[in-house]
Amino acid sequence: MNSDKLQLLGYTFQSTHWLWLLLLIPLIGYFMFSGERNRKGDRKFTGTAIEQISIANSWIPRARKLLLFLQIIAFTLLILAMAKPYYPGDAEATEEEYQKGIDIMLAMDVSLSMMAMDFEPNRLEAAKKVAKEFVESRMGDRIGLVVYAGEAYTACPGTVDHESLVAQIDSIGNEPIEGGTAIGTGLGTAVARLRDEKLPSKVVILLTDGSNNAGEIDPISAAELAKEKHVRVYTIGVGTNGEAPTPVITPFGVRFEMAPVEIDEKTLNSIAQITGGDYFRATDETSLRSIYEEIDRMEKRRQFNRQFAPEEPATPRPFLLSALILLIASWSIRHFYFTYEL
């Protein structure tokens, strides 16, 4: 046997060096059966040979041998358990995937153009709705929220209290925030919230409906910073193709006019490529939901591979439980059935 993984009965054994102990099983069996053959009685018997024969039972020696077999099988199962068996269908692997989550920051554009009505009822409300669904689907992840327009601020630091985060997402839209679209500042703020170098996996999901026209940080510079900090960025451009009813500030207040949808897809693509993420375009709520679902699937696969690819989680419970049952059964029968009071 070598140090490589071994597959047997659907299980993958990861620490195969323990399996060398199986070579000792025949030797252990030999000594156990030899000891049973040479074993003296538990009690002295002073009666005649005829009396001894009268209380003897021919199946008892065979039953004692069966108990020895049970013990040998139990020892074999214990050795297999030490070899770290893994069964792909075991539920523990799925649970473990969610117990060790990743860190995600949502960076959401809240500029005036996000009130455009090409989504129902508008881009911002649709983005909030889908973001909340995404948050509720990410069991065990620490998720935070950055909102930005002409400036950016952290609406919610990374947290596993998803109920509080959902409430914070609900409140988006009432911020007294400077006008414009500072994509670089929004991304930079989100990356700063993920600056802990010990975090094993860090992700930013940046959503916008326009192009960078404010802020002091260039989007590409922010992407380079994200790359340096090992932060993966998924970018989402929100807006229908063509024109959309868009709010415009006039001397008489805000009114809606048909305006072309102008998303800087080149920059959003560059941000994603630099950081190892992907760029997506959402033209309605359905496609936006599909994008979040795709990001959800990709990040779960990445998380699974990061945690389990080097070594799958050992699942020795069936082996240990079977060995325990056999040992208890063997001990109980030997001590409660074969012990006589004469």
Image (tube, helix red, strand yellow):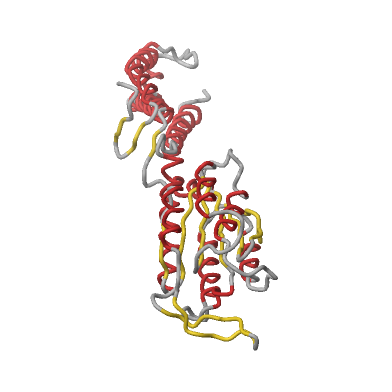
Rendered view: 72 above or below 150? above
Q: Quadrant of residue 195?
A: top right
Question: Which residue occupies 52% across, 23% down?
Answer: 342
Residue 186, image x, y percentages: 58, 58
User: Residue at (58%, 62%) from the top-left corner?
Assistant: 182
Extreme residue in the front direction = 251
In percent of width and height, residue 321 lies at: 45, 37
Question: What is the total number of numbered labels drawn onto the structure image?
Answer: 0
Outermost residue toward the right in this view: 176
- Asked whether, in this view, residue 76 is left or right of residue 129, the answer is left
Q: Nearer the viewer, residue 116 or 296?
A: 116
- Looking at the image, residue 31 lies above or below residue 130: above
Q: Quadrant of the N terminus?
A: top left
Q: Nearer the viewer, residue 273 or 1?
A: 273
Would you say 129 lies left or right of 89 here?
A: right
Q: Quadrant of residue 32?
A: top left
* Left or right: 339 in relation to 197: left
- Towards the viewer: 338 or 178: 178
Relative image position of residue 217 (x, y in whole percent): 58, 54
Q: Is residue 21 above or below residue 285?
A: above
Q: Residue at x 48, y 49 (%)?
A: 232
* Residue 243: percent from left, percent from top: 43, 80
